[in-house]
Image (tube, grey):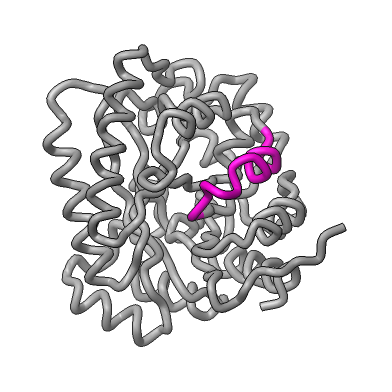
């Protein structure tokens, strides 16, 4: 059995603010302010975070708040809309704004996901209504992502594609098609453990097969009974979140084998961000408790 470890100089632990509030569904919120959120991230032992809608938009202010807590931004999110009409130019413009932001914040990675036709923000059955791309749409998405990937590379940055529930690139088969059709130097993979498991596929196998393309990781755990209920009852993404489908690595209620996944990434010399992401209702899952649970687990597994 392998005992290879991550190089702690090149692997960074971050967390998303989605345990403190939800950025897709703004009513999943108990009023926790930005300052408390980032203070608790730092208190739990994280060194970075993605951004949320409560964060200051002034970069100088944001930097000051994060610097004072020893935090930095791991990535911005940019939704792409290449699979639908008349959205190419806006998508490129939005991406360039994200690029300027993350450069100013000293980061390297920009996370994107194709949300054209997505069911995940709609009050409808999540899986039954997700888009199935035509060959033309696949071609448009691949062309668009290649363009963005080149823009990122030219700026010494990385585009990391996030396969996502409710979208046209949700399942392992979708990831395979995307990876096969894109240039590894331009389109990197953001590996989200929870989204792939929720899609019905094996996250460990994906980690093994695409270790060399994975440049950014979201560590999201799944409560299996709730996932099964979500599938059986055809719940929406929001209903699944509110039912508690997601939790953090290290939670005994979760079903994902993070030990093996992290070992696989270490075996392949993964460098970059490992981001804890659990979209939980803070009314039911105290954010600091779960952040500390996740960080302690990661420390036990990685040694730092």
Which residue is at 66% across, 35% downward? 226
The quadrant of the image that shows the C terminus is bottom right
Magenta extent: 202-216
* 30 versus 189 height, above or below: below
Q: Quadrant of residue 156?
A: bottom left
Asked where in the image residue 64 lies, by quadrant, the reply is: bottom left
Q: Quadrant of the N terminus?
A: bottom right
* Of residues 109 and 289, the one drawn nearer to the viewer in this rendering: 109
Residue 200, percent from left and from top: 64, 28
Instruction: Kindly identify the residue that appears in the image at 50 percent across and 49 percent down.
Output: 279
Question: Is residue 207 part of the magenta span, yes or no?
Answer: yes
Q: Percent x, y for residue 100?
A: 19, 61
Report whether 181 appears left or right of 7.
left
Residue at 31 percent of width and 18 percent of height: 137
Query: Where's residue 135, x and y in %?
Result: 36, 13
Q: In the rendered picture of this protein, how many numbered marks are placed on residues?
A: 0
Q: Is 121 above or below relative to 108? A: above
Find residue 268 and report its image quarter: bottom right
Farthest residue to the right: give it.
1
- Relative placement, left or right, of 12 versus 299 is left
| Residue under the point 73% across and 58% down | 263
Q: Does the magenta stretch include residue 40?
A: no
- Front residue of 116 and 4: 4
Counting from the top left corner in percent of width and height, residue 84 is at: 23, 22
């Amino acid at each position: 059995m392998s005992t290879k470890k991550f190089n702690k100089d090149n692997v960074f632990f971050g967390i998303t603010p989605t345990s403190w509030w939800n950025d897709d569904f703004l009513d999943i919120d108990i009023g926790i302010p930005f300052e408390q959120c980032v203070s608790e991230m730092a208190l739990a032992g994280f060194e970075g975070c993605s951004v949320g809608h409560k964060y200051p938009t002034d970069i100088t202010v944001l930097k000051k708040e994060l610097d004072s807590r020893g935090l930095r931004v791991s990535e911005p999110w940019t939704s792409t809309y290449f699979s639908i009409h008349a959205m190419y130019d806006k998508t490129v413009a939005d991406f360039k704004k994200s690029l300027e932001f993350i450069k100013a914040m000293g980061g390297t990675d920009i996370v994107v996901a194709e949300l054209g036709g997505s069911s995940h923000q709609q009050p409808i059955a999540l899986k039954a209504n997700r888009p199935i791309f035509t060959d033309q749409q696949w071609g448009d998405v691949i062309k668009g992502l290649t363009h963005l990937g080149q823009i990122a590379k030219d700026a010494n940055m990385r585009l990391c594609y996030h396969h996502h529930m409710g979208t046209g690139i949700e399942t392992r088969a979708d990831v395979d098609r995307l990876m096969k059709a894109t240039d590894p130097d331009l389109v990197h993979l953001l590996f989200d453990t929870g989204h792939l498991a929720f899609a019905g596929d094996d996250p460990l196998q994906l980690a093994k097969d695409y270790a060399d393309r994975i440049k950014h990781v979201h560590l999201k755990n799944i409560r299996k009974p709730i996932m099964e209920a979500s599938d059986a009852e055809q719940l929406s993404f929001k209903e699944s979140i509110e039912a508690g489908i997601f939790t953090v690595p290290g939670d005994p209620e979760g079903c994902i084998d993070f030990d093996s996944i992290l070992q696989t990434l270490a075996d392949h010399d993964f460098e970059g961000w490992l981001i804890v992401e659990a979209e939980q209702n803070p009314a039911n899952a105290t954010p600091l408790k779960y952040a500390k649970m996740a960080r302690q687990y990661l420390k036990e597994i990685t040694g730092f």
